[in-house]
Image: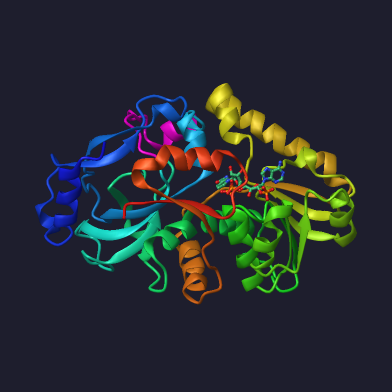
Amino acid sequence: MIIRNSLNQIRHFSQPARKLKTAQKMSAWSIHSYGDIEELQLGENRIPVISDPEEILVEVKAASVNPIDSFMLGGYGKTSFQVLRNFQLEFPLILGRDFSGTIINKGHGVNQFNIGDEVYGFVPIHKQGSFAEAVLASQCHILPKPTQLTHEQSAALVYATMTAWSGLFLAGNLLLKQKKGLRVLVLGGSGGVGTAAIQLLKSQGCFVFATCSKDAVALVTSLGPDMVFDRNDPDFIKNVQNESKYHIIFDAANMGIQNIPNSWQYESYITLNSPLLVNNDKYGLLGGLITSAGNLIESNITRMCSGKSVRWGYFVPSNSGFRFIHELICRGKIRPVIQEQFKFKDLPRAIETLRKGHSRGKIVVTHD
Ligand SMILES: NC(=O)c1ccc[n+]([C@@H]2O[C@H](COP(=O)([O-])OP(=O)(O)OC[C@H]3O[C@@H](n4cnc5c(N)ncnc54)[C@H](OP(=O)(O)O)[C@@H]3O)[C@@H](O)[C@H]2O)c1
């Protein structure tokens, strides 16, 4: 049940934000233990209190749903995230990694933003999330909301595009490489990260190939890749093979290196679904790290002779990365693709829709 009084208070506070008191409540989706979708409870939580001079408090207008929210609901990554949280109690835990909204309060060290500014941004994985009426964020993780976009469109672009940037520019080393003419195959071109990756790569002059299901071919084609492969085509593997060699295969479909045919020629394969956090959950931090290092070495050694490497990509909360994609978003080089919008009260349905696994862009929850 949405607490109407709290909602009204937050709306009211957007002007005189100094009146916010720690005792006041907001409506938030939180979990009190790990499990399945029924763990999500909509209730009253304390409005987060600014404890760092660099922090801002944002009234959330929209947030997007990401696979990590669904995974974290089941306890994914809890061992590693607890370390990042300095072993503080994680529950009640609010999920949601990105947001777009209005600043309602700020720390005294925040000088680039003012109360009332419309911003979009993200929250690092170990912090309380954005599936709430208000969220705390660091000033280096927010930027002014692009004026040509709605809050829903802006929120849709943050986490997925930042993941595409991190995977390609950091794990894939594009930060240092000549990008023009680079041949990149994006697996899962129709999903949140895939739709962003295609546009990001095209904006850099790369030669982009993308895969998706038959029904998504038109959508993916509209994003401007040089070639789209229908993965339902009986000749799919051969068609992809015929266009190799790729400099990079960017796996935004969780296909896994074990399912990449040997006949596909490439230099680097980047997965966004490394076993690192799962290994940490299973074997503890040290055991997990050792097992993961072994996994990575093994994947690379077995492919070394054919000149192929395997890399693990992750969302990285980089200020410079966010500024880079923000500039492309403002210039219209990366535009949002939204599959469906859900009301805030329908967050469980939004997560269930994402779990069906055939996203066409992003799923967004909105407070409007
Ligand atoms: N490491 C990190 O920091 C990080 C951050 C974000 C995301 N991720 C991971 O990156 C992946 C992409 O994220 P996302 O937000 O883009 O997810 P998404 O929106 O759910 O998109 C996934 C796409 O994969 C395709 N797909 C589903 N099953 C497939 C299969 N069996 N074979 C080939 N393609 C398949 C689907 O397209 P079709 O139906 O058209 O095939 C779907 O559009 C997810 O696995 C997510 O867990 C990791």
Q: Residue 256 location in percent, x, y? A: 72, 40
Residue 169 appears in view: no
Residue 71 vs 167, above or below: the answer is: above
Which residue reaches farthest bottom? 331
In the rendered view, tell whether residue 151 sits above or below residue 292.
Answer: below
Please state if 238 lies on the left or on the right of 199 as rendered: right
Q: Position of residue 330 (x, y in %)?
A: 46, 74
Percent x, y of residue 173: 66, 59
Residue at x-position 35% and y-position 26%: 32
Magenta region includes residue 87: yes
Magenta highlight: main SS: loop
| 365, above or below 222, in the image | above
* Image quadrant occupied by the C terminus: bottom left
Give 219 or 193, whichever is nearer the viewer. Answer: 219
Question: Residue at (69%, 70%) from the top-left corner?
Answer: 179
Give percent across and percent down for residue 12: 14, 56
Find residue 202 and report its image quarter: bottom right
Nearest the viewer among 247 and 345 is 345
**Magenta segment boundaries in residue numbering:** 79-95
Identity of the residue drawn at 29% across and 40% down: 28
Residue 213 as seen in the image, left or right of residue 262: left
Q: Is residue 59 magenta?
A: no
